[in-house]
Image (spheres, rainbow, N blue to C red):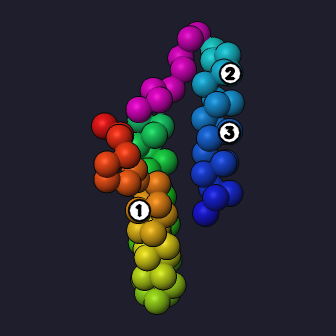
Amino acid sequence: MFFLLRLAFWLGLTFAMMDWPDGAAPDPAALAQAAAQAAAQDIASRCAAAPQACLEGASKLESLRKAASPAPGRGGN
């Protein structure tokens, strides 16, 4: 999964810096939306194939989210 995030970052950076013919650079919002849809479809197909692995991954993501959020009383927004 981390590989996919790194891949998306570097490809996005590469495409943003490329010279496009006639200034026809792709719309970054459309590219981001297409990438998000592809990722969602990939996750959905993997969850349909292995529901237990999907639940384990969801619990790991939840624990990462909790660890990344600021603790109450420590500032933040």
Q: What stretch is highlighted in magenta?
A: 22-29
The residue carrying pointer 1 sits among few (fewer than 14), some (14 to 19) or many (20 or more) residues within 10 Å by Cα, namely few
The residue carrying pointer 3 sits among few (fewer than 14), some (14 to 19) or many (20 or more) residues within 10 Å by Cα, namely few
Q: Nearer the viewer, residue 72 or 21?
A: 72
Quadrant where the C terminus lies? top left
Q: Position of residue 70 (x, y in %)?
A: 40, 50
Q: Which residue is drawn at 48% across and 82% down?
A: 56
**Residue pointed to by mark 3:** 10
Quadrant where the N terminus lies? bottom right
Q: Is residue 9 left or right of residue 42?
A: right
Q: Is residue 11 left or right of residue 30?
A: right
Identify residue type, mark 2. Met
Q: Which residue is drawn at 41% across and 35% down?
A: 30
**Residue pointed to by mark 2:** 18
Residue 47 visible, this angle? no
Q: How far apart are marks 3 and 1 (CA)?
A: 27 Å
Q: Position of residue 11 (x, y in %)?
A: 66, 39
Closest to the camera, between mark 1 and mark 2, is 1
Are the residues at dot 2 and dot 3 in contact (C-beta closer than 8 Å)?
Answer: no
Q: Position of residue 27 (x, y in %)?
A: 45, 26
**Residue pointed to by mark 1:** 66
Identify residue type, mark 1. Lys
Closest to the camera, between mark 2 and mark 3, is 3
Q: Check the image and report above or below for 38 versus 74.
A: below
Identify residue type, mark 3. Trp
The residue carrying pointer 2 sits among few (fewer than 14), some (14 to 19) or many (20 or more) residues within 10 Å by Cα, namely few
- On whether residue 43 falls in the magenta region, the answer is no
Q: How far apart are marks 1 and 2 (CA)?
A: 38 Å
Q: Distance between the residues labelled 2 and 3?
A: 12 Å
Q: Check the image and report above or below for 73 versus 13.
A: below
